Image (cartoon, rainbow, N blue to C red):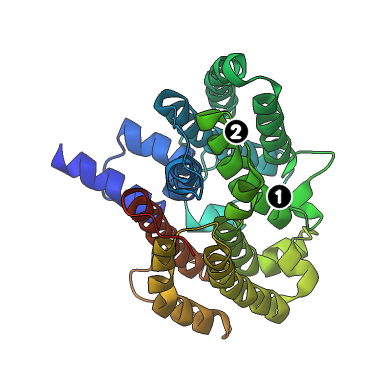
């Protein structure tokens, strides 16, 4: 059992499993769903619940609905990742020599699951999400449907025709909307039945952080995407300006947290996010320089580079932000 748990830990850390290790069923599904990036979704959902208790006007948190919402978000993220892999393969984007097939196992190309099996998994996950949606809609009404359908629209048409948002420089704004307003505000609403204006503002800092991760990934994939005519924002901006833009987003995260504390939207304890500043300085330094020509020793997700640094900052900053919200529940201080 210990070796199996080690497998899961490796997959969640690296989105890979060493070739000498036997593939177990859980590791297989963690790879298929790209579970290594679920922490971003969990953080957005948990923020939505914590803001009910740690905001400037604390309200009752309905724990069952909150848990349903977070589970639904994780399942929706899993479905989104599988949908992206399916449509990118069908559309001729993903291949063994494309970046997606190099940094981590592709569900179909690497034989983790058949094409039909992937479609069945997508349907199964969406059926469970639909059941959660029906229940929460019966409690809170049509706004739940609006949040869910908006997220589903961006999720499906991120890569699916005819819109292919990622191909038109709209993938990054779409991720900002999903991981910020839709996830944070949506979870707050289904957990409380309320939707105050300040929660929309409170959703912005983490939305910015998650967007830096996608910027990093698309900078890494810029040459390959450009060759395939995929016009992500980094392709449109060019390598250097895209890296500058990511640095600006990192600074915007800290600036937004500070503004929200000064305006009384966040409690003072959320300034704990600034404990990640040393990591932010290091990550901004990474983005200031071209990608190295060779990966460091034992680096697991090459040819991705910038995204790993952006993700590490997002995980740390998001964690400190969550800790600040928790502290504010027990000892609230607002300016």
Q: Furthest residue to the right?
A: 162
Percent x, y of residue 84? 64, 41
Can the viewer see residue 292 in this picture? no
Determine the image quadrant of residue 126: top right
Residue at the image position 54 percent from the left and 60 percent from the top: 264
Res 194 label? 2
Q: Earlier in the sequence, mark 2 or mark 1?
A: 1
Between 324 and 280, the one lying in front of the other is 324
Between 70 and 334, the one lying in front of the other is 334
Question: Spatial distance from mark 2 to mark 1, Cα to Cα?
Answer: 24 Å
Percent x, y of residue 280? 47, 76
Kind of element beneath mark 1: helix
Q: Where does label 1 land, which residue?
A: 174
Q: Quadrant of the N terminus?
A: top left
Residue at the image position 28 percent from the left and 48 percent from the top: 9
Mark 2 surroundings: few (<14), some (14-19) or many (≥20) residues within 10 A: some
Q: Furthest residue to the left?
A: 2
Tally of numbered tags: 2
Residue at the image position 47 percent from the left and 47 percent from the top: 47
Kindly check if marks 2 and 1 are in contact, taking CB atoms under 8 A apart as contact: no
Q: Nearer the viewer, mark 2 or mark 1?
A: 2
Residue at the image position 27 percent from the left and 50 percent from the top: 20
Between 118 and 52, the one lying in front of the other is 52
Can the viewer see residue 247 in this picture? yes
Percent x, y of residue 69? 50, 30
Determine the image quadrant of residue 46: top left
């Amino acid at each position: 059992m210990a070796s199996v748990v080690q497998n899961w830990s490796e997959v969640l850390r690296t989105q890979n499993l060493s070739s000498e290790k036997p593939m177990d069923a859980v590791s297989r599904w963690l790879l298929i769903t790209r579970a290594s990036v679920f922490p971003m979704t969990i953080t957005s959902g948990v923020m939505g619940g914590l803001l009910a208790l740690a905001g400037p006007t604390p309200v009752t948190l309905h724990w069952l609905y909150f848990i349903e919402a977070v589970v639904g978000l994780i399942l929706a993220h899993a479905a989104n990742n599988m949908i992206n892999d399916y449509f990118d393969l069908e559309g001729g984007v993903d291949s063994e020599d494309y970046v997606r097939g190099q940094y981590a196992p592709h569900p179909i190309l690497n034989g983790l699951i058949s094409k039909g099996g992937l479609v069945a998994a997508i349907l199964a996950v969406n059926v469970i999400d639909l059941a959660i949606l029906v229940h929460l809609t019966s409690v809170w009404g049509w706004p739940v449907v609006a949040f869910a359908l908006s997220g589903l629209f961006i999720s499906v048409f991120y890569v699916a025709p005819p819109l292919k948002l990622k191909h038109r420089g709209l993938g990054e704004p779409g991720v900002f909307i999903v991981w910020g307003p839709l996830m944070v505000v949506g979870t707050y609403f289904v957990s409380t039945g309320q939707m105050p204006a300040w929660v929309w503002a409170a959703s912005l800092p983490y939305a910015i952080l998650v967007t830096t991760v996608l910027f990093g990934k698309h900078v890494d994939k810029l040459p390959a995407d450009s060759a395939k005519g995929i016009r992500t924002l980094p392709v449109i901006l060019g390598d250097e300006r895209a890296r500058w833009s990511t640095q600006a987003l990192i600074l915007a995260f800290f600036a937004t947290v500070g503004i929200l504390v000064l305006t009384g939207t966040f409690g003072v304890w959320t300034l704990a996010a600034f404990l990640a500043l040393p990591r932010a300085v290091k990550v901004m330094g990474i983005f200031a320089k071209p990608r190295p020509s060779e990966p460091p020793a034992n680096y697991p997700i090459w040819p991705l580079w910038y995204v790993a640094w952006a993700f590490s900052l997002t995980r740390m900053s998001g964690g400190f932000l969550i800790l600040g919200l928790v502290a504010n529940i027990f000892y609230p201080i607002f300016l």
